[in-house]
Image (spheres, rainbow, N blue to C red):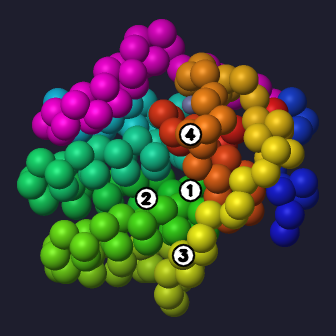
């Protein structure tokens, strides 16, 4: 499967932009997270994830619930963190590229183990495998070397949340596609 033969995004189906209120809340959530105000960031991310899921944007809902879970782990609120992981995994199973999200959870599992949260790491791993029907988690590849062609293909702004794309700060997936750091939507030119 190649990026080109992928989902019918090229057909020009325009995704709905998020509302100005949601856009503001998204910026606020990230600002709180950057300032390590995790208990303030987490509920904002959780609400935004709910809104994205209600609109059927599963990729965005996954990313935002994942962000909320990360903040809850940082805060030390493990129950709420696991509840958000469960929601994120649920959204990921409905998304177009579950393997990409399985890798994302792989990174979370690694980070949890690094912080000696072994029980939680095991739970996340079991949940992802069970819900996604995987016998094991996909291998964590190194992100591909980023070249000029990859950067050139990126849009100036994210079509979903409107955030300007900073090409120096993009996360590229193993298949060379890129995701918006703010909302988790795939960036397509
Ligand atoms: Zn975005």
Q: Is residue 169 left or right of residue 13?
A: left
Nearer to us: label 3 or label 2: 3
- In 3D space, how far apart are the residues under numbered discs 3 and 2 (Cα atoms)? 21 Å
Nearer to us: label 3 or label 4: 4
| Tag 2 and tag 1, C-beta contact below 8 Å | yes
Of the 4 image quadrants, the one containing the N terminus is bottom right
- In 3D space, how far apart are the residues under numbered discs 3 and 1 (Cα atoms)? 21 Å
Q: Residue at x 19, y 37 (%)?
A: 36
Which residues are the magenta region? 13-39
What secondary structure is marked by label 2? helix
* Numbered label attached to residue 169: 4
Q: Earlier in the sequence, mark 3 or mark 2?
A: 2
* Numbered label attached to residue 90: 2
Q: Quadrant of ligand 1?
A: top right
Q: Is residue 59 left or right of residue 62?
A: right
Of the 4 image quadrants, the one containing the C terminus is top right
Q: Is residue 40 left or right of residue 9?
A: left
- Check disc 1 and report the residue beneath it: 94
* Image height of 129 relative to 67, above or below: below
Q: Residue at x 10, y 53 (%)?
A: 77
What secondary structure is marked by label 1? helix
Does any atom of ligand 1 lie closer than 8 Å to the CB of label 1? no
What secondary structure is marked by label 4? helix
Residue furthest to the bottom: 135
Nearer to us: label 4 or label 2: 4
Is any atom of residue 35 visible in this view?
yes
> Which of these two is toward me, 186 or 87?
186
Q: Earlier in the sequence, mark 4 or mark 1?
A: 1
Is any atom of residue 93 visible in this view?
no
| Tag 3 and tag 4, C-beta contact below 8 Å | no
């Amino acid at each position: 499967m190649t990026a080109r033969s992928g989902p019918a995004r090229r057909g020009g189906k325009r995704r709905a932009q998020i509302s100005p209120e949601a856009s503001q809340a998204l910026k606020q959530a990230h600002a709180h997270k950057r300032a390590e105000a995790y208990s303030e960031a987490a509920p904002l991310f959780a609400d935004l994830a709910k809104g994205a899921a209600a609109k059927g944007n599963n990729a965005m809902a996954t990313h935002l619930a994942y962000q909320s879970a990360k903040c809850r782990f940082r805060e030390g609120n493990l129950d709420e963190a696991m509840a958000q992981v469960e929601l994120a995994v649920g959204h990921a199973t409905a998304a177009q590229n579950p393997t990409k999200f399985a890798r994302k959870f792989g990174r979370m599992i690694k980070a949890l183990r690094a912080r000696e949260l072994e029980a939680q790491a095991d739970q996340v791993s079991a949940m992802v495998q069970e819900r996604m029907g995987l016998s094991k988690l996909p291998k964590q590849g190194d992100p591909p070397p980023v070249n000029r062609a990859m950067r050139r293909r990126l849009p100036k702004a994210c079509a979903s949340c409107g955030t300007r794309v900073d090409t120096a700060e993009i996360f590229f997936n193993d298949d060379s596609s890129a995701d918006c750091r703010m909302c988790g939507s795939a960036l397509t030119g």
